[in-house]
Image (spheres, grey):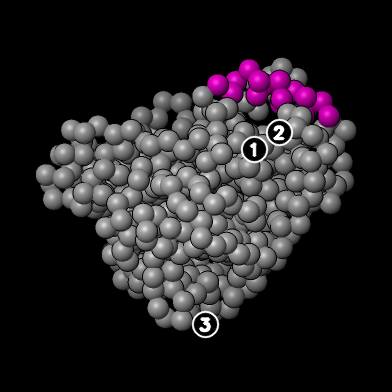
Amino acid sequence: MKIIERPYRENDRRALLDAGMHPLLAKIYAARSIRSAAELAYSAAGLLPPTLLKGMEQAAALLADAIQAGKRLLIIADYDADGATACAVGMRALRLFGAHVDYLVPDRFKLGYGLSPELVDLAGERKPDLLITVDNGIASVEGVARARTLGIGTLITDHHLPGAELPQADCIVNPNQMGCTFPSKALAGVGVMFYVMIALRAELRKRGVLKIEVNLGALTDLVALGTIADVVPLDANNRNLVAQGLKRIRTGRAQPGIMALLRAAGRNVSEASSFDLGFVAGPRLNAAGRLADMSLGIECLITDDEARAANCARELDRLNSERRKIESGMLEQALEKLKALEGDAHSTFYSADWHEGVVGILASRLKDRLHKPVICFARAADGRNLKGSGRSVPGLHLRDCLDLVAKRSPGLIVRFGGHAQAAGLTIAESEYPRFALSFEQALEETLPASARTRTVETDGSLQQAYYTLEVARMLEDGIWGQAFPQPLFCDTFAVESQRVVGERHLKLLLNKDGRRLEAMRFGALDPLPGTLRAAYRLAVNEFNGLKSIQLNVEHVES
């Protein structure tokens, strides 16, 4: 692995410095293509307007008509954090608008993803007048057709890439649909639903039927959580949305469920960060969808009862611990498979014993180790099919790669969908060997040479004067995530000591130019050499109420 320094334009760094920015931040932001301090002045007024989204006026009118007519609305949620937060945004806002609304989330093990005909039949038992999908639906051609035959209307809100055929819904709002000029194609599912609610509020105001003034800014904590947890690129608009949400969380004005999720993990709410959303609250929320029923996660987010929120959060915390154990066992099996392959190229993995809800995390872990796209499969509940979840590396669009496989071998993939960096699919178990070969061939053709090189981009060396709690906290306060990475530094250290802690981690004492520094290497037990060049993050470690700086070593140059 080669550690390199992220380039930046000196003119941009100087402009940020002249605007009064901290010298370290000026360099970091310049390396992320920020050219002026104004780009970092996040405010609600600076968000892109909802009217830029195709179908938005139609969606607002459709919902306003339904509310005024007293019709029954049913949100069809997804079983990940983005889907759960999008559902919570819809439930909270629509109730405030006076709608008769409920939600339904599919059992991933029985019904799978999206608005399937089977899910529509289940939804039909509740006699809804309008189905509203969140974080799904753009590929639900058959499900929407089934709803139409039952006389049920459909509003699709989604952000996934559409296929060759769009569902014949009453209305579709998706920044990635053909003809939509919304500048932020990276909007998460929760972001789309938030924008729909803003447009609906405007429509109800225009009609003069808004009974109370609804503060939708109070829902930005949910938008921030779903956006970070879904690992969508943090473009300017998404960073702004996350900034609004973090501000609410840090000032103690978040939903009881989000506060409870952070407290269950022992996090200080007043110092909540992007990291806390992506690696603390997000995984606990996702644990419900992976191992049980996401209804638990949604209930956690929509209740106003603090005691109920705390109970839900404790159960989600327990499920997350269980998920970690399952994941650890699956990773051990996968690494054994890798050893048996003796270096052969391998991007697909399968075991009949693996848990369907955890294969996505396993794929992510293997992708990081192998530095190439990986798809992991588990046996589906029907006993005939395999459910796969894949993760990609920068430079390869995973959904497009699966589309290539599907077109070359019609019928090989039963269904698939997703993003550039993550995708899901279903294949027949008997077709696994053929799929593995087809996928390897597609990767060979589409994975660029630049994506095959194991390089880690960093923000360069960190001056010793910046090894302080103030600087570490300043960095943690930033809005970081996909395509706008958290600062990562690189330096050469002498390793004075190393020991295993917590069975899976290394505790290190490093020396740089005569200064000793506490460090951790999480999730890795390989002994380190006496001298190393490492990529690391500057973090705050809290133990027994005392805070100190700690280097979290993420990569070691080989």
- Mark 3 neighbour class, 10 Å CA radius: few under 14, some 14 to 19, many 20 or more: few
Q: Nearer the viewer, mark 2 or mark 1?
A: 1
Residue type marked 1: Leu
Q: Nearer the viewer, residue 421 or 20?
A: 20
Compared with residue 166, is residue 356 higher up or lower down, i.e. above or below?
below
- The residue drawn where x is 76% and y is 29% is 344
> Is residue 522 at all visible to an observer of this figure?
yes
Which of the two residues, 35 or 283, is positioned nearer the viewer here? 35
Residue 365 horizontal/vertical position (percent): 64, 47
Which of discs 2 and 3 lies nearer the camera? The answer is 2
Q: CB of mark 2 within 8 Å of CB of mark 1?
A: yes
Occupied quadrant, residue 498? bottom right
Majority secondary structure of magenta residues:
helix
Along the horizontal axis of the image, is 25 left or right of 343? left
x 21%, y 49%: residue: 23
| Residue behind mark 1 | 370
Mark number, residue 307: 3
Front residue of this view, candidates 300 and 335? 335
Residue type at the position of mark 2? Ser
Q: Is residue 224 magenta?
A: no
Tell me: 30 left or right of 275: left
* Residue, disc 2: 347
* Closer to viewer: mark 3 or mark 1: 1
Residue at figure coordinates x 82%, y 25% from the top left: 434
Magenta-highlighted residues? 433-449
Sequence-first tag of 3 and 1: 3
